[in-house]
Image (cartoon, rainbow, N blue to C red):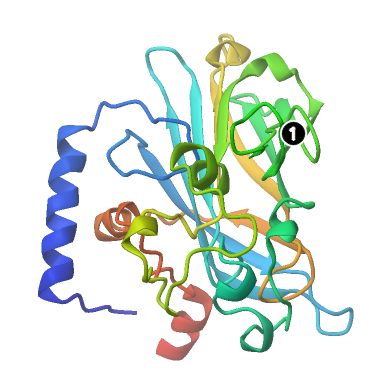
Amino acid sequence: MMRTLNAATIYCVAVVLVGLSTTLNATPIVDGRFDPGEGYTLGRYVNIEVEGKKKSGNIPADDGFLWILHDPATQDLFVNFTQPRTLIDNSYGENSIGWGSSAPSGKNHNFKDLKGSDKAQFIITDADGEALLDFVMDYFSEDCATPSGYASLGVSGKDGKVNTGSEDAFLAWGTSLDYNFNTLGHVLTEDSPAADEDYIVTDPAYSDWLYEVTYEFQIDGTIFEDNGFGELTIPLVHDSPNKIGKNKVYIKVDGVIPEPATVALLGLGSLTLVRKRRKSTASSQ
């Protein structure tokens, strides 16, 4: 499906791409925010299906994004996984966007939902196919150790855990709501910032609020030893609730690499170009 970009968007994309080229060798900052200039070298679309009713089966959703850097110097593995806002987002309370009667699931979205049971499972193998890490990452929970009182507990608490491997392998982690609360200092426990249906924020003081639900982490490269990094899979994500169906979300990493313009727009905080390629492909045939 072809997309057209207006002049202002093309200019912004060009500016971001120039910045991207100058920071190609940068190392990602693991904070829950995707930045195309941070050094991620491998991008993939991820196909998403949401658990539906028994008779209807799973429901296809818009694509998410997976970004990976396997640092050649340290062998550390950096991962950023971002879900589409049409599935779940960091809007909640009175200012939730696309929830309630506007959502296929009919579900409302409140702050307590995001700090409830949301989590994502990841499996990392070496080049021989051996599973070195199988873990579940907590999205957002109460944490008295932070000034905001909330944070992602990663694999060390609440919904996070390590099924295979060791917690020592995790050098850093972050999520986008953690970024909003603890990096930006926007501690909003009732309503997210007011915004229109395109996520344009009303109050400029909150213009940097991240609406995308993102998981990001850094793995110690020594776990790969001489075998090297093999593959990363995302067997299951728990989004409770989400806009589309029931709570289980199934992920399959695609072989398609996002276009540079899409990468740039993601860096600008826009996921409106997320593709529903199943539908667009079908309509073009």
Q: Residue at x 45, y 55 (%)?
A: 210
Location of residue 285 in the rendering, given as x and y in whole percent from the top left corner: 43, 89
Q: Amino acid at mark 1?
A: Phe
**Residue toward you, 91 or 268:** 91
Asked if 225 appears above or below 101 in the picture, the reply is: above
**Residue toward you, 153 or 249:** 153
Residue projecting furthest to the right: 54
Asked if 72 appears above or below 157 in the picture, the reply is: above
On the question of residue 35 being in view, the answer is yes
Q: Residue at x 30, y 58 (%)?
A: 259
Kindly identify which residue carries mark 1.
135
Q: Residue at x 88, y 84 (%)?
A: 55
Screen quadrant of the N terminus? bottom left
Location of residue 233 in the rendering, given as x and y in whole percent from the top left corner: 64, 43
Asked if 33 appears above or below 171 in the picture, the reply is: below
Location of residue 146 in the rendering, given as x and y in whole percent from the top left corner: 62, 30
**Residue toward you, 27 or 210:** 210
